[in-house]
Image: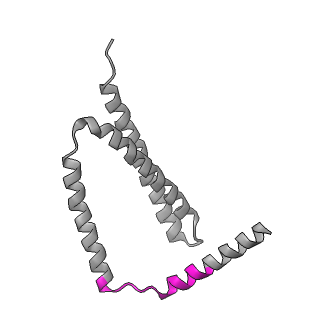
Amino acid sequence: MHFLLANEAVKNLVDASTEASTVVSVGPDTVTLLLTVFVLAVFIGVEVITKIPPTLHTPLMSGSNAISGIALVGAVIAAGSGDALLPRVLGCAAVTLATINAVGGFMVTHRMLGMFRRKD
């Protein structure tokens, strides 16, 4: 009984999201807003990153590696969705770039942690 109710709720949610996605339109005001948010995020990101002391860099790098892992999962989902060629190609490119980002981040973190080990 619970499974049928949950299945019906999922169907209603999918139908509602499909209807909502057809109504949304992107105009010049939306593009300007998104561009403004992006530029502000870049400036704030640069200011925050330049103020981080070296002792906090390694823990923050580990946190960003976790975020890269989440991006990798999203890229895998994007690569598997759709039957057309373009979404699959873009998804595979996203998987490749997210993997390089995550592996490179772990390599940098490992190297930095090696700097704090005792030398025998």
Farthest residue, direction right: 1
Decide whether residue 40 is among the magenta residues. Answer: no
What segment is highlighted magenta in the picture? Answer: 15-29
| Residue 38 coordinates in the image, percent (x, y) | 28, 67
Q: In the image, is 2 to the left or to the right of 27? A: right
Q: Main secondary structure of the magenta part?
A: helix
Q: In the image, is 16 to the left or to the right of 27? A: right
| Residue 104 coordinates in the image, percent (x, y) | 38, 42
Q: Residue 115: which quarter of the image?
A: top left
Q: Residue 10: which quarter of the image?
A: bottom right
Q: In the image, is 76 to the left or to the right of 111? A: right
Q: In the image, is 8 to the left or to the right of 89? A: right
Residue occupying the point 53% across, 65% down = 88
Question: Which quadrant of the rendered structure holds the C terminus?
Answer: top left
In the displayed structure, 8 sits above or below 29; it is above
> Viewer-proximal residue, 100 or 19?
19
| Residue 63 coordinates in the image, percent (x, y) | 39, 45
Decide whether residue 19 is among the magenta residues. Answer: yes
Residue occupying the point 49% across, 62% down = 91
